[in-house]
Image: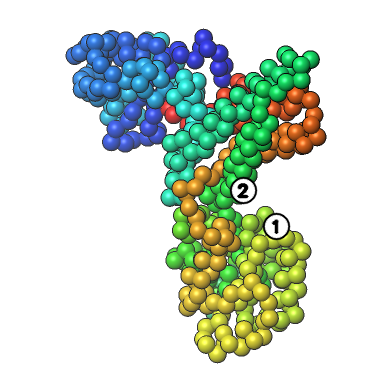
Amino acid sequence: MNIQASTWNDLIVAMATPPGVGAIGVVRLSGVGSIELVNSMFPSKDLTKELGNTIHVGLLTTNDIALDEVVVSLFRAPRSYTGEDIIEISCHGSPYIQQQIIEACIVKGARIAKPGEFTLRAFLNGKMDLIQAEAVADLIASGTKAAQETALNQVKGGFSHVLSSLREELIKFSALIELELDFSQEDVEFADRSGLRILLNKIEHTVGELLHSFQLGNVIKNGVSVAIVGKPNAGKSTLLNALLQENRAIVSSIAGTTRDTIEEVLNIDGILFRLVDTAGIRNSNDEIEAIGIERTMEKMDKADIVLYMFDVNDESTHELKKVESELKEKSKSFLLIGNKADDAKTIESAQHKFDVENMLLLSAKHQFNLDQLKSKLIHKVISGALNTENTIVTNARHFQSLQKVESSILSIQKGMDQHIPGDLLAIDIRQCLYHLGEITGEITNDDQLDFIFSKFCIGK
Ligand SMILES: Nc1nc2c(ncn2[C@@H]2O[C@H](COP(=O)(O)OP(=O)(O)OP(=O)(O)O)[C@@H](O)[C@H]2O)c(=O)[nH]1
Ligand SMILES: [Mg+2]
């Protein structure tokens, strides 16, 4: 994508609704001349004389052939999503009609928009900063309430306002320190050093909190993978089915029933857990089963959380301790699930027998203690209440830049402790300003914008 000023206000067109048949479809145009273009296809009214934020019903025609009866929404620059003139044509949801309308627009001089180009323009025209623009893509992709709320919070401004205002304050200090350089012979200090320290602490604190929120942010956006592993017949597939409340995996009393991994998504309190049922681990001469067990090992290594499931009537304490220490050695987040604890007597003797932490007794078959398993899973992820009102960083790009801001703040503070000269301090401050600006988009380059917006869908 070429993001030069001369090319980013030309006329673009795209479907804003997904492909396929629907009740209506929306074709969106933005850029100089979009109102005139649609007006030339709209004989019943002179759209060029209409005000912004208005809608108009009429026939859409090309070369005197009627294409459809449509509703045209008209927005005038700068009061539109992109900040340019925008027309949205709501037509009937036939892919054929939509295609004809787009083709007619192209014949009249529009070009097909690139992915995210409407939002890119909104950013370039100052309608939103980069954090907000990126959150638009997250909002479209959100699949849970928590993901939706975090993205919406950022579209509405989220942490960009805080970072921008801290950056503004730092710019003032930077200017004063640079001014001192002009008077370097006279040993003057325009920039109040104690004020600068207070500001640096404020930035450090804010950035620290944002960095801390990333792990949770990532979980909200991408979900958590949970591998259910254990010996054959432990009840892994029964547990998967019970959690999903459907007969997804085959359950049988034959050891080695599950051969390949089975993945399903479970939403617990707004967080997506990607559950993976695996082939039971044992020494097997069966070629296919052996491959399945290899996959189990892979899934276990990759999982965020491992549920090691065992039959309380079957497993020895020694075996369980061994598994526990192996998982600890791998620094895995894990839970030991003692299954087939069907009645009070079995529960009591199992509690006695297995003296390990991180153990939960349940009965997958009788669906006993599953709620406790769910709350333990949630607790493992967020260790506390999930509050999406808080500002949460979900984006790896922001996370990396925040890390750089943090390390540049440390260098400035260290420099001040060592009373380094103003010109060196100014370099560190410039570095910090640069990384803060990278996050909100005050500092960008074409490649970076290209990368960010190419992940959008066309029409947004
Ligand atoms: N009594 C009792 N039986 C259970 C329980 N959970 C599972 N089972 C039984 O244990 C047997 C094995 O269950 P599966 O869910 O197929 O076990 P698995 O761990 O997936 O086994 P593989 O796929 O062979 O690795 C089945 O006969 C289940 O009905 C339980 O909580 N209590
Ligand atoms: Mg199974």
Query: Which residue is identified by label 2?
Result: 212
The chosen color scheme is rainbow
CA gap between label 1 and label 2 equals 24 Å
x, y (%) of residue 266? 49, 58
Disc tally is: 2
- Which of 214/377 is in front? 214
x, y (%) of residue 180? 71, 19
Amino acid carrying label 2: it is His
User: Relative to residue 328, is residue 351 depicted above or below?
Assistant: below
Q: Determine which quarter of the picture holds residue 359.
A: bottom right
Q: Determine which quarter of the picture holds residue 65.
A: top left
Residue occupying the point 51% across, 86% down: 343
Q: Which mark is residue 301?
A: 1
Q: Choose mark 1 or mark 2, whichever is in front.
A: 2
Note whether residue 260 is visible. no
Local packing at callout 2 (Cα closer than 10 Å; few below 14, some 14-19, many 20+) is some
Q: Determine which quarter of the picture holds residue 448.
A: top right
Classify residue 125 as left or right of residue 379. left
Note whether residue 228 is visible. yes
Residue ranking furthest to the left: 44
Residue occupying the point 53% across, 57% down: 273
Where does the C terminus fall, quadrant-wise?
Answer: top left
Local packing at callout 1 (Cα closer than 10 Å; few below 14, some 14-19, many 20+) is some
- The disc, 1 or 2, on the residue closer to the chain's N-terminal end is 2
Amino acid carrying label 1: it is Asp
User: Relative to residue 167, is residue 344 depicted above or below?
Assistant: below
x, y (%) of residue 268? 48, 59
Looking at the rendered structure, the secondary structure element under dot 2 is helix
x, y (%) of residue 206? 59, 41
